[in-house]
Image: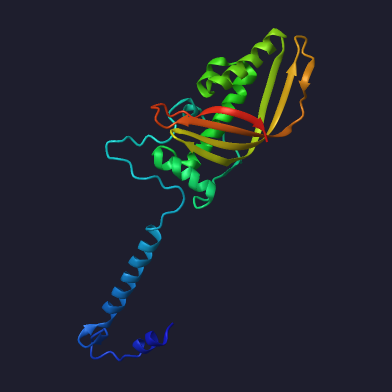
Amino acid sequence: MSKSLRQMKRIPVQGNNIVQSMGGFPVALVIFAGIAIFLILRLRSVLGKRVGFERPPAPPSQARGGFGQGPIIEGQAQPADLGHAVPDPRSPLGERLMQIVRRDPHFDPPKFLEQAETAFRMIVTAFAAGDRATLQNLLSPHVFQTFQDAIAAREAANERHRTEIKRIISATIEDAQLLDDQAAVIVRFTSDQVNLTVDEAGNPVMGNEAVTEITDLWTFERNLKSQEQTWRLAAARSG
């Protein structure tokens, strides 16, 4: 307790008046008013701060449906203990992401990572199952052709492929670029997987039943002028 407050407590109470006064004005009101002003200023200093990737305000007529209304969004994310690492918006990579945020009011980097993780699961599963329809909705044309060729070769050899994603350890935005209207975001996935290809008789051709940690670098692209909100896989390689 400060010295001034201790002195106020020693101010004698006159008569039956239980409110201390100073020049005819209640001292208690002065104290409470000061506390109220202090709290208001503190709240404004905290609530008024901008942290992270705040999106610019959208026009009133613009729907705020959130980023990604294509198949990636419609997929259900699996509960997992993965870490979603979003760069500091003040870093060079964060500034490149902010260029996309300013161009696309639906783009939100943390939400994008969640959706990218869902797309990762869907694409890996669809490739193993030979599900061309799902892949066509999630891949760029040239990547789809590459996957289609691999599936066709597997089918011609009467081979079956099985992939199980045991868990996704982490998903991290590695880079982002905006060239004219074309935006690209590179995500590094680290996951524990089982990958096994067997022949017609069920004998292993490639891979095994062991759980292996795999790192992939996937590039998602979208034309920001397009009405379609889906970010499609445009490149994939091991990290």
Question: How many circles with numbers are drawn on the protein?
Answer: 0
Horizontal relation, residue 183 to residue 41: left or right: right
Question: Height in image: 92 above or below 39?
Answer: above
Q: 171 or 223, which lies in front?
A: 223
Q: Which quadrant does the N terminus fall into?
A: bottom left
Residue 224 location in percent, x, y? Answer: 42, 32
Q: Residue at x 31, y 75 (%)?
A: 34
Q: Position of residue 68 (x, y in %)?
A: 44, 32
**Splitting the image into 4 quarters, where does residue 24 fall?**
bottom left
Tell me the quadrant of the picture where the C terminus can be found.
Answer: top right
Find the residue positioned furthest to the front. 180
Q: Nearer the viewer, residue 192 or 206?
A: 206
Q: Position of residue 28 (x, y in %)?
A: 29, 79
Q: Is residue 93 above or below residue 38?
A: above
- Residue 55 percent across, percent down from the top left: 40, 45
Q: Is residue 87 left or right of residue 45?
A: right
Question: Image quadrant of residue 142?
Answer: top right
Q: Residue furthest left?
A: 24
Taking 236 as reference, is 148 above or below it?
above
- Give the residue at x 58% y 37%: 187
Q: Residue at x 73, y 22 (%)?
A: 196
Residue 108 horizontal side relative to residue 211, left or right: left
In this orientation, which residue lies closer to the viewer: 224 or 212? Answer: 224
